[in-house]
């Protein structure tokens, strides 16, 4: 049996996608590969594969210990993708960014959740041959279409029963939360809900200004804060439209969660989405186009139905069963490499 040791501290901070991806992978392997792969957590015993999900310094030090097997790094971010997320002092930023790349270079192999990362890692001096693209996925038992009506779910969540636009993610500038707020102001006849909070507290980019709005939002905008994963399914199903106006992303778990719930998806049309989810969402180039399309979608049930069908196709393509086979084959191949 292949022994895979997972290393991560992501679950210490609630409301971030890295933790969700980590937990999803562990659950996936236990569900579909239990007879072939033995998974351990933060365990320094002999392993065939050591899979690093976060870049803690203690994990970096562990790579120098014996019996670690093949060291695989999970690339959830690069220095440039952290811009607009965290506000760090200049010296701290320089030191951390250099450390991050050093950590990745220490790995025998890297997994990226978006193929657009491969040339960027090459630019840092990491050979493309060491990098593999494996997409994210989410559990179909945790995120799925509810049988309850939207009216019933909104009542359960304390929301008004009207057309609802949902945003999910950390409350930070990079996620486009300022645009989400302005869109709510421009559409007082609709309900806007943002699920997520300040996972990194005061070092969150835009914290001071965003904190003021969260404390006193427009009357048609609700900030729920960080909620438990099981409750997230209610929010996706209560929404008429999922909107993520991010300026920079990798492969957000929230998009996959929306797809699984068959919730229509509207996104800022980032180039990095084109290689992974093109054709499954409604694109908008900027806030002005988002505003136009939100108004049009709210008045056009047939268009929403078309987007639901696209979400359904995406959910099928990124199913956990398909990804389980991909991960199993990847681990087995890495373990055999010299």
Image (spheres, grey):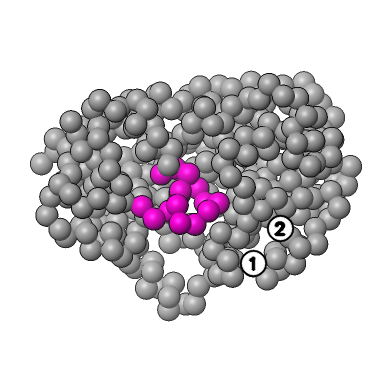
Q: CA distance from mark 1 to mark 2?
A: 9 Å
Judge whether residue 20 is colored magenta.
yes
Query: In percent of the image, x 34 and y 68: which residue is there?
Result: 98
Q: Does the CB distance between marks 1 and 2 fall below 8 Å? A: yes
| Disc 2 element | helix
Q: Quadrant of residue 23?
A: top left
Viewed as shown, does residue 103 lie left or right of 250?
left
Query: In percent of the image, x 43 and y 53: which residue is there?
Result: 10
Residue 189, horizontal then vertical, whole percent: 89, 42
- Number of other residues with Cα within 10 Å of mark 1, as a class: few under 14, some 14 to 19, many 20 or more: some
Residue 178's mark?
A: 2
In the depicted structure, whether residue 149 falls above or below residue 57: above
Q: Main secondary structure of the magenta part?
A: helix
Judge whether residue 142 is colored magenta.
no
Query: In percent of the image, x 46 and y 25: which residue is there?
Result: 319
Residue 14, horizontal then vertical, whole percent: 53, 53
Residue 206's mark?
A: 1
Viewed as shown, does residue 26 lie left or right of 267?
left
Quadrant (top left, top right, bottom left, bottom right) of the N terminus: top left
Quadrant (top left, top right, bottom left, bottom right) of the C terminus: top left
Q: Which residues are magenta?
A: 8-22
Residue 208, horizontal then vertical, whole percent: 68, 71
Total numbered badges shown on the rendered structure: 2
Which residue is at the front of the view, 237 or 172? Answer: 237
| Disc 1 element | loop
In the depicted structure, whether residue 5 falls above or below residue 173: above
Viewed as shown, does residue 217 lie left or right of 285?
right
């Amino acid at each position: 049996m292949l022994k895979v040791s997972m290393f991560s501290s992501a679950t210490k901070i609630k409301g971030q996608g890295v933790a969700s991806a980590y937990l999803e992978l562990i659950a996936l392997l236990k569900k579909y590969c239990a007879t072939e792969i033995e998974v351990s957590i933060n365990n320094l015993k002999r392993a065939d594969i050591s899979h690093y999900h976060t870049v803690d310094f203690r994990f970096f030090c562990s790579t120098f210990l014996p019996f670690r097997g093949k060291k695989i790094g999970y690339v959830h971010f690069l220095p440039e993708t952290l811009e607009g997320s965290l506000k760090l002092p200049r010296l701290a930023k320089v030191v951390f960014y250099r450390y991050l790349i050093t950590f990745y270079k220490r790995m025998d192999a890297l997994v990226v959740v978006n193929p657009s990362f491969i040339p960027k890692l090459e630019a840092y001096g990491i050979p493309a041959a060491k990098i593999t693209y494996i997409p994210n996925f989410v559990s179909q038992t945790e995120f799925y279409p509810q049988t309850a009506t939207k009216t019933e779910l909104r009542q359960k969540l304390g929301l008004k029963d009207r057309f609802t636009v949902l945003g999910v993610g950390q409350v930070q500038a990079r996620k486009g939360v300022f645009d989400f707020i302005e869109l709510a102001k421009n559409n007082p006849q609709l309900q806007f809900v943002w699920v997520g909070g300040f996972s990194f507290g005061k070092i969150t980019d835009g914290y001071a200004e965003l904190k003021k709005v969260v404390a006193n939002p427009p009357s048609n905008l609700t900030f729920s804060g960080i909620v438990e994963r099981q409750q997230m399914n209610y929010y996706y199903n209560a929404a008429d439209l999922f909107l993520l106006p991010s300026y920079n992303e990798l492969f957000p778990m929230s998009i996959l969660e929306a797809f699984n719930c068959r919730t229509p998806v509207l996104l800022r049309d980032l180039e990095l989405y084109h290689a992974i989810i093109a054709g499954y969402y409604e694109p908008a180039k900027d806030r002005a186009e988002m505003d136009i399309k939100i108004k049009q979608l709210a008045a056009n049930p047939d268009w929403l139905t078309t987007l639901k069908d696209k979400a359904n196709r995406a959910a099928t393509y990124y199913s956990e069963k398909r990804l389980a086979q991909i991960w199993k084959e990847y681990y087995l191949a890495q373990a055999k490499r010299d």
